[in-house]
Amino acid sequence: MTEHQKDRFATGVIYFLVGIVVILLAGILGNILINGLPHLSWHFLTSESSDFQAGGGVRDQLFNSVYLLILTTIISLPIALGAAIYLSEYARDNWITHLIRSTIEILSSLPSIVVGLFGYLLFVVQFGFGFSILSGALALTFFNLPILTSNIEESLKGVSATQREAGLALGLSNWKTIRGIVVPAALPGIITGVVLSGGRIFGEAATLIYTAGQSGSLVDYHNWNPLSPTSFLNVMRPAETLAVHIWKVNTEGIISDATAVSAATGALLVLVVIIFNLSARYFGNKLYQKLTAAK
């Protein structure tokens, strides 16, 4: 076999494997959307769920999912960014750094049910936060930090050393070089890490069952006082997300249209993740262009 034939054969194998991945993804997404989209309606999106009769919606679950995503990102992103900057720019190559990286890898492989039990024992019981959005966000932060830190660190390492040297040559301090040159240049990779972690947050159920609980009271969307028990902004209220709602509907079997509700909720969850991914990448690219003057 000539080199040209080997090249064509290897290229064909690669295209074949990529085709399998595309077919699997298209099949999974197509099955979810085909089964769920016919049951989606404005009433389903804007009405509250009903545990005892058909026709309920997922208004509260949709808001809780987005609220938890925002709160978890606000908590975890600064911590992950700081840890990644330390590991990439300041940490020496010694046993302590290797221990930190090994710990991060171990934490990233923990089952979500273990993180949920840890969050339950620490935040719900020990700290007395109860089943609440805050408990869920803190537990998801532990669940989210390893993969987010690793992605950001790899993005920072991918920035060319010449850009760091150029900043230092201009008389900038190490911190100003990192803040003004390295981080903006690594922004696309950082956004990718946020998108990946956001998808995990949206789809997480086991951790939130033990920490955020399930919606137990009516939510008033006209009450902007975050300290009020009925306010939609109150972080101390229990909150059922879309993923938890799918689990609840299929396990309890209380409502008669459980199959339709779970199918519609699954399709909505996929659509929300897609919209979040596209929005994050769009605004991330805009910010990258603004910070780096790139086109």
Image (cartoon, helix red, strand yellow):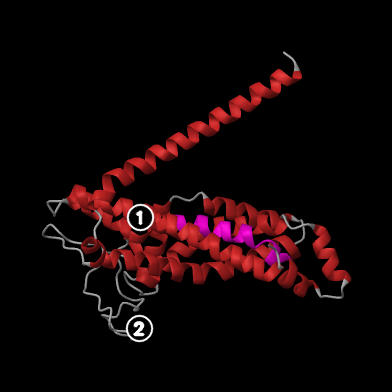
Q: Within 10 angstroms of label 1, few (less than 14), some, or many (20 or more) residues?
A: many
Residue closer to the observer: 211 or 157: 157
Q: Identify the image quadrant of residue 128.
A: bottom left
Q: Which label is found at residue 287?
A: none
Q: Amino acid at mark 2?
A: Pro
Place of residue 146 in the rendered image (x, y in percent of width and height, measured from the top left): 56, 57
Q: Label 1: which residue?
A: 269
Sequence-first tag of 1 and 2: 2
Q: Is residue 92 magenta?
A: no
Specify whether 116 is left or right of 217: right
Query: Which portion, as a residue range, is magenta?
Result: 182-200
Q: Secondary structure at mark 1?
A: helix
Circle 2 crowding by C-alpha within 10 Å: few under 14, some 14–19, many from 20? few
The answer to whether residue 181 is above or below residue 36 is: below
Q: List x then y, in percent, for residue 120.
A: 37, 64
Residue that lies at the very extreme toward the right in this rendered image: 169
Examine the structure image and report whether residue 198 is included in the region drawn in magenta.
yes
The kind of residue tagged 1 is Leu
Query: Which residue is identified by label 2?
Result: 226
Q: Residue at the location (49% across, 31% down)?
A: 20
The N terminus lies in quadrant: top right
Q: Nearer the viewer, residue 119 or 222?
A: 222
Could you tell me which residue is drawn at 54 percent across and 60 percent down?
281
Q: Position of residue 290 (x, y in %)?
A: 66, 70
The answer to which of 267 and 227 lies nearer the viewer is 267
Task: Using residue 292 as the reference point, say whether residue 269 is left or right of it.
Answer: left
Residue at image location 28% in from the left, 78% down from the top: 221
Question: Which circle, 1 or 2, is nearer the viewer?
Answer: 1
Residue 24 visible, this angle = yes
